[in-house]
Image (tube, rainbow, N blue to C red):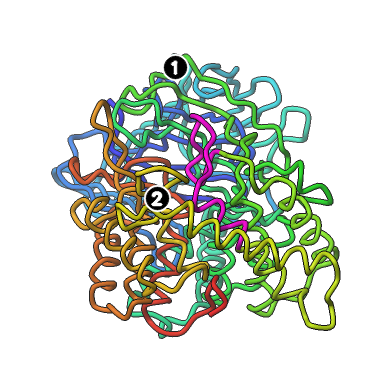
Amino acid sequence: MSRPIEDYALIGDGNTAALVSRDGSIDWLCWPRFDGDACFAALLGTSDNGCWTIAPAARIVRKTRSYRHDTLVLESDFEVDGGAARVTDFMPIGDGPSAVVRIVTGLRGVVEMRSELRLRFNYGEIEPLIERIDGAMHARTGPDRVVLRANVEIKVCDGAMLAAFNVAPAESVAFTMSYGHTHDPEPKAFDALAALRSTQRFWRDWIARFDDSRTAWPAAVRRSLLTLKALIHRRTGAIVAASTTSLPEAPGGRLNWDYRYAWLRDTSFAMVALLNAGYHEEAGAWRDWLLRTIGSAPERSRIMYRVDGGRHLREWSVDWLPGHRYAKPVRVGNAAAHQHQLDVLGEVIDCLDVARRGGLTRADQEDLIETRIVEHLEKVWRLPGAGIWESRGEPRHYTYSRVMVWVALDRFLKHHGAPSALSPVVERTAWLRDCIREEVFREGWNEGLGSFTQYYGGEEIDASLLLMPLVGFLPSDHPRMASTIERIRRELSENGLIRRSKKNPCGPSEGTFLACSCWMADCLNLQGRTEEARQQFERVLATANDVGLLSEQYNAQRRELAGNFPQALSHLAIVNTALGLSGPTLQRGGG
């Protein structure tokens, strides 16, 4: 049976990432990138679908784990009768091949350890050819080559690479597993301990740029920033939404999506978080990736892309994987990339506005791309779409989508609409901005409910409406906005956390949405209800697992994390809310 999502910790190298369980098993790893094929897929199946376990051979009586301070170096301690050992896991940062390093160190007594490595390429389907060459184990299939090296004997049995060894106090055994293409020279051997020192130094030097005095929750913010850095593709600057695919949002349901891509919708959230935390280099790389990806044709933009800007994300089902806790289908690719979602282009222009106000040097072609986005929105703003939550049902006129069109026009005018620049484009944009604002007030408001609604003419509320004051559309204490916030708090709250929408009475329901729960804290803070906002925020912090990681959602009934993991939007919300509750910050709405 699949392990709970909170059982996992993340290690990564800026190219890809792996998930390590409490039991010492790496159950998820895609190579050579986040959006590459998985060679360990036990997360969504069984050990036969690929994993790497290192643990004591004897019964474990106690196990603990933690990250080394301010790093993504994971230490897992295992105690058995008469002894204890530690497994240190990390992925080296540098210009060498992408690799996983596992160092086993004796702590007390003599502990018998076992390593079992099962590589299964193409998402757990294909067993590679394995051979020993110059003392190293080479596993190859198609374009993929993995080389395993260790200072203990490794045997091959039933498609697995096995090792049994003892460690005494202060003794260490190091395993290095490196990836390369079969048509390239084999990955070279490297010193595992030297790699550990340099990787540890990289993470600590990077996070040292954050000033703890900025927030009352420095530990949570630092861990969220480190997690976000691990989700940034270091060569392109793209931020993936999560390192996984198809972790279910609802138990046993079909809400299983591939999140290993970069969403345009996350641009503004990421820009605010990175700039407020002092990471201008990463913010600039994200902005530059965004502009390269959209190019000169925003009318043909997608809502998400591969980390290299590639736009082909064909969705298909991995039928041979049973799914996490038998939630099927297991999906690769994401058909939502083709959806019409008006809000994403608003997010793009808002992101560029935040970047300018945050001190980033203006990029080449930035003004041209903004102008073309606005010209495109002028043509399509009346069309129904899929909305922020990427509904695969009937297209609708979603209130938040219209608000984000307003945001696009508003930010464009702030940048280009000086009195001396009264061009036809500026005049049209100003008229349309006012027109859309009036329409949202008229069509998005339900007088009977006393609330804005999810879509025009509807009666359903939606937590995305909490973003209206956060993007500057309405003050949080405006009577209509205040009424909407309170209705969301009453009707979408579960154990103090906020759902995106009401529970499904006819089937499995997704969990509470952690980013939305942070947005509620932001709204309360804007209303001056600071203590309530802090309590709301700390309820979100309490859902993190033992190493500080958050998924997309939290199932309040089961008391467990749900959805893809770790989730960038959740950790971005942690950074933004923690800093916003602690003092003045750069805000999306211009504050």
Image coordinates for residue 236, horizontal then vertical, percent: 71, 53
Main SS class of the magenta portion in the image? loop
Query: Horizontal placement of 429 versus 172: left or right?
Result: right
Residue bearing the label numbered 1: 157
Residue bearing the label numbered 2: 453
Image coordinates for residue 170, horizontal then vertical, percent: 34, 57
At x 62% / y 34%, what residue is drawn? 36
Using a 10 Å C-alpha cutoff, classify the residue at mark 1 as few (fewer than 14 neighbours), some (14 to 19) or many (20 or more): few
At x 15% / y 46%, what residue is drawn? 82
Image coordinates for residue 419, horizontal then vertical, percent: 79, 83
Of residues 273 and 463, which is closer to you in this image?
463
Of residues 282 and 334, which is closer to you in this image?
334
In the picture, the disc for residue 564 is none
Locate the N terminus by quadrant: top left
Q: Magenta includes 283?
A: no
Of residues 369 and 423, which is closer to you in this image?
423
The magenta segment is 386-406
Q: What residue type is disc 2 on?
A: Thr
Q: Secondary structure at mark 2?
A: loop
- Reply above or below: 425 against 152: below
Query: Horizontal placement of 557 versus 412: left or right?
Result: left
Residue 171 can be seen, yes or no: no
